[in-house]
Image (cartoon, rainbow, N blue to C red):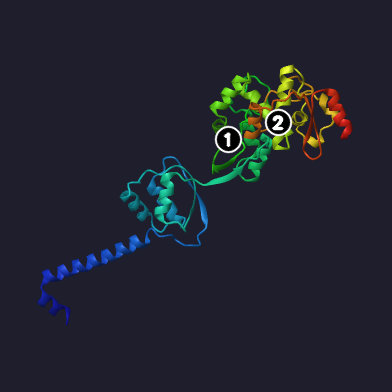
Amino acid sequence: MPWPAIVRRLGPGRILGLLVVLALIAAIGWAAGFWNTGGDPVSPKAQRVLVHVTDGSSLAGVAEHLQRLGIIRSALYMRLYADLSHNAGDIQAGVYLLSGRQSAAEILRKLVAGEVATRKLTIPEGYTISDIAFLMQAKGIARVSAFVTAAQGFPNPFIPQGGHVRYRLEGYAFPSTYEIPYGSSPTQIADMLFAQWEREFTPAMRREAAAEHLSINAVVTLASMVEREAKLERERPIIAAVFLNRLRLGMPMQSDPTVAYALRRPLDAVSIKDEHYPSPYNTYYSKGLPPGPICNPGLPSIEAVLHPAKVGYLYFYGLPNGSHIFSYTYAQQLAAERAHP
């Protein structure tokens, strides 16, 4: 039927109503498609991208940026979804690892929760600050020089002011596995390692140290020496007892790992003549404990210092298998050395 005839039969009012209905149907169809697809992942094969969200960034600006990067289908969808879920404006600053494999709703949840991208860092027991610095550089987390600088000037309340220590963070970068957020500065990383140490060194441990008339720094320094000397778990409390017995008698500590630390050399590169090297870290040359720890000890070595074996040994001699011969007198020590050259 020709349009003029349809108009005459239905009348202008009915035609207008029909057009409105058709427009509504089209709008509903578009909206349904928009809500079904606007927030869907872009692609199951999309690569992950690091996205920097700075302080003060608006959701609208971040959504537009994500759409330009091809991470989300629609910035409008993300903004409308945020309004409906009452998350508009609540995004957190940071570096995020995002992908088109994630839905817009999932990405928004990450931004609101502050689930920033991280890199795993595992610090083994006995690592020095220098070891940690090179480990972080190898993982692309921080440059050696930058972390060393942060460790040197770290505001450690347990290191006496004016103490001639190499790194004020040495001994207090707790060995553990960390998730380091992208963009963390060396100072922020140092704070993180120290905060973990403070959690691990409990109030009960501090009371035990005070009961033994040992400062926190003395405990950690002794533990660092035990960490570098002990090869067998069962010998940690015995080695700790030897050092504590020597300390209380005013004897030199005479620990080879302290010489290696003073010289910045591996232990197997230290010779007898190096025992005369002038350094406060060299416990053959300087009496008493070093000014600070020589590595970052784990809990077993700290516990060994706080709960040493009840023995009167004053000497120990290392064997190739990692065990030690313990002696009460220097004559017994010399005999052990002759028997196991």
Q: Nearer the viewer, residue 198 or 240?
A: 240
Give above or below for 44 relative to 265.
below
Figure quadrant of residue 289: top right
Query: Residue 121, image x and y in percent?
Result: 60, 43
Whether residue 157 appears in this view of the structure is no
**Disc 2 on helix, strand or loop?**
helix
Query: Residue 174, image x and y in percent?
Result: 60, 35
**What's the CA distance linking mark 1 and mark 2?**
21 Å
Dot 1 or dot 2, earlier in sequence: 1
Query: Residue 185, image x and y in percent?
Result: 56, 37
**Left or right: where 132 falls relative to 35:** right
Closer to the observer: label 1 or label 2?
2
At 76% from the left and 28% from the top, the residue drawn is 255
Residue under label 1: 193
Figure quadrant of residue 239: top right
Q: Quadrant of the C terminus?
A: top right
Whether residue 338 appears in this view of the structure is yes
Mark 1, residues whose alpha carbon is within 10 Å: few (<14), some, or many (≥20)? Answer: some
Taking the view exactly as shown, the residue that stands out farthest to the top is 250
**Left or right: where 255 falls relative to 174:** right
**Label disc, if present, on residue 149 of the rendered structure:** none
Residue under label 2: 226
- Amino acid type, callout 1: Leu
- Amino acid type, callout 2: Val
Dot 1 and dot 2 residues touching (CB under 8 Å): no
